[in-house]
Amino acid sequence: MIIADGGHLAWRINDIMGSSREGHPGCSTGKRNYRANGPIQATPAPLAPRREGRTVTGAGPQSHAGTLADPRFLAGIREEMRRFAMHQLRTREEAEDAVQEALVGALKNADSFGGRAALRTWIFAILRNKLADIQRQRQRQHVPTAPEAIDDTLDQGDNPGLFDGRGLWLETQRPSRWDHPEKDLHDRQFLAVFDHCLNRLPPQQGRVFMMREVLELDTDEICAELGLTAGNVHVILHRARLGLRSCLEHNWINQGA
Amino acid sequence: MLTDCHQASVLISQASERRLSLTERARLHLHLGVCRACRNFAADLPVLGKAARALAAGLPQSGAEEGAGVEPRPGTKG
């Protein structure tokens, strides 16, 4: 499923909102939200009325579902979601699908959120669940990642390029102690640098790292999904961490030094 | 066998994935006792995971978005 950008998408979301499309397992809350139109109904609203134009039946004018229909907000968050999803899925189509489904899922409870920041966090939580679902589903179906994605040079003994012949840190790579890392996590520029560093990693390293740290899959789950051994996964994670740490140190921590 | 920085960094990374053996922990501990760079590496690593989750949550953009509204605000609270 390919979807259009910006305003066109907002239109589309409105359209979908009116339907009784079921939530996917990753974001199901087990309850439906009918309160926008008055008293709680025992049965789902009939489908037929949504054919009448694009009246958004599920959202009042002040709701955050309405915020989601704001093309600028939606285009921005959708782009972020897509970048995030692309780190973990193989194709653009898959990422688009996951983003679209997460947005649709988010709309169901969007008006319980007090502001855009909270709404954004909520939307990304749903996207993460959606991505974890996709990974687990693949695992069940034993669909391995494309074989060319597997790095056959994975040997723990190999020097990843940050150490000298005796296994000591190279002068330029020696880790320093980072000050105030917690504060940086709320810094927009820091996260932009981090995003840049993530994109500079070999794709497989970035994907495995995100599967581990964001989806919080364990080694076995990652192995099953990607057709790797536990040893491979550990080497990939080690390389990813070395690469990210080094990149952050050079582009953020020591930027002014 | 002495543990070098490369090996220590492997153990530090793997400690997030599995329980290290007693021998591995002993080797790592001995190395960290004498190597500030590896202690720094161990201290820096958790920041990477947190940054990934913060990026995923999209926290940093919210402030800018909030102030960028172009539409008239429907019914200001008061």
Image (spheres, helix red, strand yellow):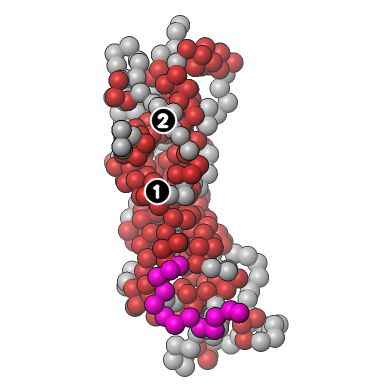
SS type, badge 2: helix
Locate residue B14, reporting x and y percent.
Answer: 49, 27
The residue singled out by tag 1 in the image is: A191
Is residue B40 shown left or right of residue A251?
A: right
Region in magenta: B66-78
Q: Is residue A111 above or below residue A254?
A: below
Is residue A167 among the parts visible in the rendering? yes
| Image quadrant where residue A227 sits | top left
Q: Nearer the viewer, mark 2 or mark 1?
A: 1
Judged from the image, the secondary structure of the residue bearing numbered disc 1 is helix
Residue at 49 percent of width and 70 percent of height: A104
Q: Residue furthest top?
A: B1
* Circle 1: residue type: Leu
Q: Position of residue A126 (x, y in %)?
A: 52, 60
Chain letter of mark 2 equals: A
Magenta residues: mostly which secondary structure?
loop
Q: Chain of mark 1?
A: A
Query: Is residue A173 highlighted in magenta?
Result: no
Q: Which residue is mark 2?
A: A238
Image spot of residue A186 (x, y percent): 47, 49
**Residue type at mark 2?**
His
Pick the residue in front: A180 or A2: A180
| Residues marked 2 and 1, same chain | yes
